[in-house]
Image: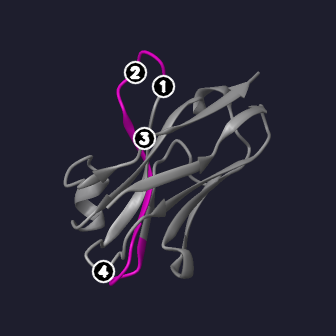
Amino acid sequence: VQLQASGGGLVQAGGSLRVSCAVSESTFRISTMGWFRQAPGKEREFVSAMSWNPNLTNVADSVKGRFTISRDNAKNAVSLQMNSLKPEDTGVYFCVASRSPLSVVVKGAGVNYWGSGTQVTVSS
């Protein structure tokens, strides 16, 4: 399974960006997909993830109300719509895929596949 991230870029504070992640193979064995990010000099942190069967989503408190995760079944892709961006949202965003439940992935565990990351920069 390969994860190909796209989107990201440079935006001013208050703006919006969308990052997407396409899975190279069938998601038959994948039950959870989502996003982590890593800011310069900081540890990688959970952003948002979703699972299917059951259909659940989880969003970090730091982005709640601003970021929305969604799935495109036809394209085997997961997207993260980021609104009202802040400079502290700057970082490399990594797409992840897992065969573990959502409750495990949000803790940073059980991730089977990591994407290469896409840069998001928010200027003040």
Q: Nearer the viewer, mark 3 or mark 2?
A: 3
User: Label for residue 42?
Assistant: 2
CA separation in Å, label 3 and label 1? 15 Å
Residue 34: x, y in percent? 42, 57
Numbered disc 2: secondary structure: loop
Q: Amino acid at mark 1?
A: Ala
| Vertical position of residue 42 compared to residue 37: above or below | above
Dot 1: element: loop
Pointers 2 and 1 in contact (C-beta within 8 Å): yes
Q: Residue type at mark 4: give it.
A: Phe
- Is 64 positioned to the left or the right of 7 in the image? left
Circle nearer the N terminus (1, 4): 4
Q: Quadrant of the N terminus?
A: bottom left
Query: Mark 4 near mark 2, Cβ–Cβ under 8 Å?
Result: no
Question: Which residue is label 4 attached to?
Answer: 28
Q: Residue 4 in the image: x percent, y percent?
A: 48, 53
What is the magenta range?
39-56
Q: Which element type, helix, strand or loop, lies under badge 4?
A: loop
Label 4 neighbour load within 10 Å: few <14, some 14-19, many 20+: few
Give left or right: position of 95 versus 97. right
The residue identified by callout 3 is 116
Q: CA distance from mark 4 to mark 2?
A: 34 Å
First of labels 3, 2 by sequence position: 2
Q: CA distance from mark 2 to mark 1?
A: 5 Å
Q: Nearer the viewer, residue 86 or 113?
A: 113
Horizontal and vertical percent position of residue 121:
66, 29
Which numbered disc, 3 or 4, marks the residue that appears first in the sequence?
4
Residue at 41% over, 65% down? 24
| Residue 89 location (% of width, % of height) | 59, 33
